[in-house]
Image (tube, rainbow, N blue to C red):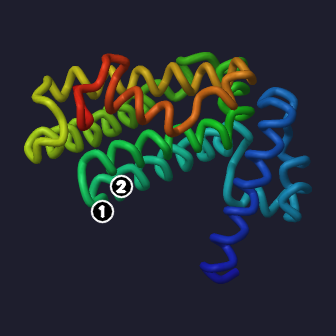
Amino acid sequence: MNRRSGIESKQRIMKAAMDVFSRKGYAKANMREIAGAAGISIGGVYLYFRNKEYLYKSLIHEKMQDIGGRTAAIAETAQCATEALSCFLGLYLERALKHKEFILLHIREHGFTFGREEKKRFFRGQKKVIEEILQVGIDTGEFRNCNTKNMADIIMGSMRGIILSIALDGEADGTITTEALKDFVLYGIGKRAKGGVP
């Protein structure tokens, strides 16, 4: 098997696992069903993932790596801090909406302790990205002076709360929009001064 076909097979398995876990839950999903959904033999699945738990953890790790890479790229390529923070918030909301069934499954079956250390490292990294964006915004005069660490904690905590709301309450899908979220984080709810920021 060449390297390219190996990568493609692994991605097919991960995609199938995401679908099966989201539909059936972790406990009821099995490797044979995932193999069938991926169009790969059961032996082929075990070639990449030694068991269901390892596959599940790999899936979570991949999702965190993906969003981490995307947010880092946003911070590096955005034209200004306002654009960077807006894109960051939009990306988180988009991912939460796209994977809400999987998020709900994870909360329901594993609570908040599963993979705790990796999650803590991930969120620390994400808060660092926000801190850097905020500091750039302060330096360029886009944002008011603030404690960037505290503000990053508040923004990240708010995002996690919104993601939980979307996963737990289907009605939140249509009410929490990227524009409303950006407007709230960037301008708050205070009355704006003429010309923009209060």
Residue 35 x/y as whole percent:
85, 55
Residue 37 x/y as whole percent:
88, 55
Instruction: Give above or below for 141 relative to 124.
Output: below
Task: Specify whether 58 is left or right of 181.
Answer: right
Instruction: Give above or below for 162 relative to 22.
Output: above
Q: Which mark is residue 77?
A: 1
Nearer-the-camera pick, 180 or 20: 180
The residue sitting at 23% across, 26% down in the picture is: 193
The alpha-carbon separation of the residues under discs 2 and 1 comes to 5 Å
Nearer-the-camera pick, 29 or 191: 191
Residue 150 x/y as whole percent:
22, 20
Q: Are marks 2 and 1 in contact (CB under 8 Å)?
A: yes
Q: Which mark is residue 74?
A: 2
The residue sitting at 77% across, 57% down in the picture is: 45
Q: Quadrant of the C terminus?
A: top left
Q: Identify the element where label 2 is drawn.
A: helix
Task: Specify whether 37 is left or right of 191.
Answer: right
Q: Identify the element where label 1 is drawn.
A: helix
The image shows a total of numbered marks equal to 2
